[in-house]
Image: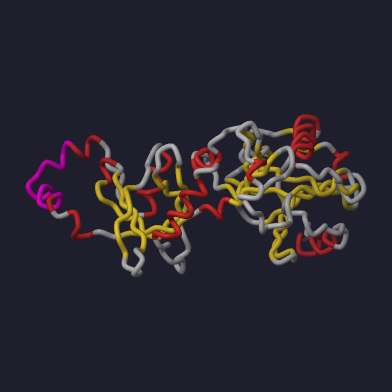
Amino acid sequence: MNYNNLFPRLLKNIPHLPPNSFCYDCINNTNYNKNARYNNNNDTRCFIPSGKRLILWFLKHDSNYYSIILEYQSSKIVKCHFKYISFNKILASGNGTMIWVTQIGRELTMNKIIYLKGKHCKLKTIGGQMEELRILLVNYINNLDHSTFIQLKLPVISNTSSVLSFTGNLNYHVYNVVSMANNYNIRVNNFLAVFWLYCIDSMNDCYGLSCKDIHGNLIHYQTALINNAQTSKFAKKILKLKYINYEDIETSDSEDNEEKDQNPEKDIKGVYVSCLYYKNHKRWKPYKRSKTNDLVDDISKIKILEDKSSRF
């Protein structure tokens, strides 16, 4: 089969995508103080993963059934490729079924149905969407445990009262936290502060966070919150630190190593890192690597973010 000829023919049949295909709330200038009444502790929320804008499309063409991934940038398709998924042929009815997805390893997280069995999906709340996606996953998708097949999953859903702390403990980066009841959005990027992260004592998972003072000088702010193995590995990875096990410790009791330990500041290096504030610990936790052109935040912005984050 010549895929170079097949893909253009498939893309000719792609239905129109509504402008809100990749979101639940098109209004991004949400006022958190004004909408504080929505932030009750019993609100169930969906944690949408961060990643490329992808659409999973189940379709039929020339008596053959396909599941393909479309990658979008600036409302244009930039890539198109097949994914091996076992699905019920009814999903390919009409123009097929199209779902906004995010890829995490060998899994596709389903975020929103755009078209279902050839018809535009009119469900507006994420609560209704997640229920329909759950039915689709149970009745129309067969997740095969095989290396050639990709798994379809739902995003994490929780009624936690510590939204940002919960976000930081998930095994994927979160783009948006959306209320299941009314689509109220918490954009995670709006709560991230950029620090300069550096190692103090990697054996004890002690890392420093520096920010700018009111004069623009880099100062130590606090030690980073490293509260699980995932964050410990992340800090070591971005700082390019060697993982040390117990055998390394037993064989490191030489005079040379002692001299190195006495001068840890000699090779201090750091990275720009975006952090989330944990209100219960009153500490910042490394969340993801920042872009190289990001600037370290100043102390006044950090204090504002701490106050803002404490409400979630």
What is the quadrant of residue 154 in the picture? top right
Magenta-highlighted residues: 250-261
* 254 in the magenta segment: yes
* 45 in the magenta segment: no
- At 52% from the left and 49% from the top, the residue drawn is 308
Q: Quadrant of the C terminus?
A: top right
Please say if 14 is above or below 251: below
The residue closer to the viewer here, 23 or 54, is 23
Left or right relative to 174: residue 261: left
Image position, residue 147 (x, y; %): 61, 40
Left or right relative to 301: residue 136: right
The residue closer to the viewer here, 109 or 200, is 200
Please say if 151 is above or below 24: above
The residue closer to the viewer here, 16 or 29, is 29
The residue closer to the viewer here, 110 or 40, is 40
Image position, residue 151 (x, y; %): 66, 39
Q: Quadrant of the N terminus?
A: bottom right
Please, what is the dominant secondary structure of the magenta stretch? helix
- At 71% from the left and 61% from the top, the residue drawn is 72
Image position, residue 97 (x, y; %): 83, 46
Q: How is the image coloured?
A: secondary structure
Left or right relative to 277: residue 117: right
